[in-house]
């Protein structure tokens, strides 16, 4: 049995929810109760405490990119796989215990909207693209970080294949929706499923933005957003949606899951920035998920060389 202690720095987005969202949730529950018959939301959809980990996903060959290395070693894979945010399955970090019913294959990713060539990719076609391994810092707004060797292809490769129209200015991502497979979608009615996120088109086309299909030498485990997720390493983690099924190019800036719930806490841009505090905690430092080092947060998560130009008009 795994006994977990919750360290003080571990502040899930759930606990960071401001009063108004809780109020809305209470109102929702009151309305639901008044309407009668709706299942009480908020119960932990639980599997027991001793669920065995799902078998490791298939190996995935990818050339290690010399350009995207870090000084130290990657975070321990097992720790990374037991400390996840994936609210479709759990509001705690124990997502790996709740993904049993998720079936990430077969899977398709649709590219649509303001493009000359809409296309639906089968995951197997994406796996045949020239994949590379990139060791990126991965920084959550909750002020923790891990260093992950992702495997993927620049998202620009997938977007360019569909020939974005001149009018396109943004990209909207949609995660999967299936209550039967995702206990959070079934029980956590105060969220607006499916998870949706967005980027400016120039952010999405930046060479760092990775359409990600694997990590640590194999396909993505379920808790990390199998089989296809987006990684945007200079932004807070929630800007990288997991288990994406649809990519839509739009003119207008798309709404996003967390911004719709808490606009002041999770603005659209959400670049990692030590000087911009979350309304209720500082972002000046960040703590490794393995319980070790605490270090100074870096502007753009240390990736300013590749992305600062995107924001230079804004100072
Ligand atoms: N669909 C979906 N995508 C998501 C989330 C989520 O709850 N649902 N959580 C986000 C947050 S807050 C973070 S920090 C990262 C976590 O990725 P990891 O568990 O692979 O480290 O996924 C992001 N993408
Ligand atoms: Mo996060």
Image: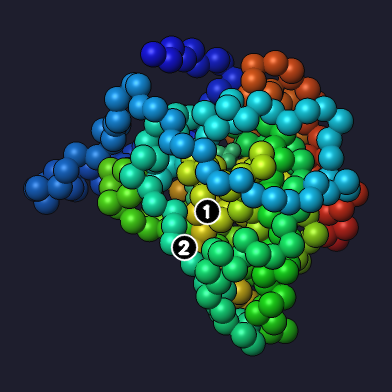
Q: Which one is earlier in the sequence, the residue at label 2 or at label 1?
A: 2
Residue under the image location 56 percent in, 16 percent down: 8
The spot of residue 279 in percent (x, y) is: 60, 34
Tell me if residue 201 can be seen: no
Most extreme residue toward the left, as rendered? 36
Q: Quadrant of ligand 1?
A: top right
Mark 2 highlights which residue?
Answer: 107
Q: Label 1's element? A: loop
Q: Label 2's element? A: loop
Mark 2 and mark 1 in contact? Answer it, CB < 8 Å.
yes
- The CA distance from mark 2 to mark 1 is 7 Å
| 50 is higher (above) or lower (below) than 251 | above
Say whether mark 2 is within 8 Å of ligand 1.
no
Say whether mark 1 is within 8 Å of ligand 1.
no
Residue under the image location 65 percent in, 64 percent down: 128
Label 2, residues with CA under 10 Å away: few <14, some 14-19, many ≥20: some
240 left or right of 70?
A: left
218 left or right of 201?
A: left
| 293 is higher (above) or lower (below) than 201 | above
Near-viewer residue (75 or 287): 75
> Quadrant of the rendered structure where residue 296 is?
top right
Near-viewer residue (108 or 138): 108
| 203 is higher (above) or lower (below) than 48 | below
Label 1, residues with CA under 10 Å away: few <14, some 14-19, many ≥20: many
Tell me if residue 297 can be seen: yes
The spot of residue 115 in percent (x, y) is: 63, 82
Residue under the image location 35 percent in, 21 percent down: 50
The spot of residue 83 in percent (x, y) is: 54, 29
Mark 1 highlights which residue?
Answer: 227
């Amino acid at each position: 049995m795994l006994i977990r202690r919750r360290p003080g720095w571990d502040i899930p987005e759930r606990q960071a929810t401001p009063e108004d969202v809780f109020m809305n949730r209470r109102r929702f529950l009151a309305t639901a109760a008044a309407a009668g018959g709706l299942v009480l939301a908020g119960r932990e959809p639980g599997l027991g405490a001793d669920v065995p980990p799902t078998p490791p996903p298939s190996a995935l060959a990818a050339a290690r990119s010399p350009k995207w290395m870090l000084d130290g070693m990657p975070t321990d894979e097992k720790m990374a796989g037991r400390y996840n945010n994936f609210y479709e399955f759990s509001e705690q970090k124990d997502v790996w215990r709740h993904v049993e019913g998720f079936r990430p294959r077969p899977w398709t990713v649709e590219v649509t909207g303001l493009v000359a060539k809409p296309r639906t990719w089968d995951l197997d076609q994406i796996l045949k693209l020239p994949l590379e391994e990139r060791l990126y810092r991965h920084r959550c707004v909750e002020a923790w970080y891990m260093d992950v060797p992702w495997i993927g292809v620049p998202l620009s490769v997938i977007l360019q294949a569909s020939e974005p129209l001149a009018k396109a200015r943004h990209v909207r991502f949609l995660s999967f929706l299936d209550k039967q497979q995702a206990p959070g979608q079934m029980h956590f009615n105060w969220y607006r499923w499916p998870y949706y996120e967005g980027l400016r088109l120039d952010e999405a086309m930046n060479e760092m933005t990775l359409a990600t299909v694997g990590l640590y030498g194999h396909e993505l485990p379920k808790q990390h957003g199998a089989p296809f997720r987006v990684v945007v390493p200079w932004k807070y983690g929630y800007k990288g949606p997991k288990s994406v099924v649809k990519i839509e190019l739009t003119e207008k800036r798309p709404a996003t899951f967390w911004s719709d719930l808490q606009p002041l806490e999770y603005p659209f841009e959400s670049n990692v920035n030590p000087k911009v505090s979350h309304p209720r905690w500082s972002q000046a430092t960040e703590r490794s998920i393995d319980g070790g080092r605490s270090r100074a947060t870096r502007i753009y998560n240390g990736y300013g060389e590749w992305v600062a130009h995107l924001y230079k008009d804004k100072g």
